Image (cartoon, helix red, strand yellow):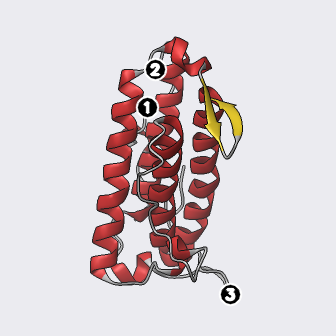
Amino acid sequence: MSKLWTAPENDPRVFGQPVGEKATYREYLDNYRLTIEMKCDGLDAEQLGQRSVPPSTLSLLGLVRHLAQMENQWFQRVLRGRTDAPCLYTHEDDPDWDFGGAVPDPEVVKDAFATWKAEIAKADEWLDTIDEADLGREVMVDGGSHGTRDVLLHVIEEYARHAGHADLLRECIDGRTGQ
């Protein structure tokens, strides 16, 4: 069995296809989201909840919960201005509840992946409604103003960073690595 995720000719990610700025952002988001999904594929709740190095609470399951929270924060609360949207995976006693609450329980896994997928669908729905001109729109964040494209680039950067974490976590679990 190869230690790579998949043979390069079977890789479902697509690179270099878009035309335009928005399409480029969408391609990167889709590929990073798929990368995270691939790195979690085939693992059970115990493996997904396996923590990295103590005292860190970092796990693949925690990353999925964190990314759901991140999608919600940036796409719903910031870009769509839905400040009444509930904050996901927060707990008043633990500022890192997205990771700390990622216990190896099948129901926690089911909830995390369903929530993440739902947040992705809502984000994609919003992305489908904007055009290139909307990328220059300013949004208010914590009393400051940020450009829509800056927020999109931040989300992509967040996925890129966590895809690297996921690669190392998966390699520790079963030796599999990314391309």
Decide: few, some or many residues near mark 1? Use Cα within 10 Å; few <14, some 14-19, many ≥20.
few
Cα separation, mark 2 vs mark 3, equals 42 Å
Residue at the spot 55% in from the left edge and 82% down from the top edge: 51
Asked if the residue under mark 2 is in contact with the one under mark 1, i.e. CB atoms within 8 Å, the reply is yes
Residue at the spot 64% in from the left edge and 53% down from the top edge: 161
Seen from this angle, which residue lies furthest right?
144
Q: Which residue is mark 2?
A: 17
Tell me which amino acid carries mark 2: Gln
Q: Is residue 114 above or below residue 103?
A: above
- In the image: residue 130, left or right of residue 28: left
Residue 84 in picture, x, y percent from top left:
43, 51
Name the mark nearer the viewer: 2 or 3: 3
Quarter of the figure that contains the N terminus: bottom left
Q: Which residue is mark 3?
A: 55
Q: Which residue is mark 1?
A: 14
> Observer-nearest residue: 28 or 99?
99
Residue 152 in picture, x, y percent from top left:
58, 34
Residue 125 in picture, x, y percent from top left:
33, 33
Label 3 residue SS: loop
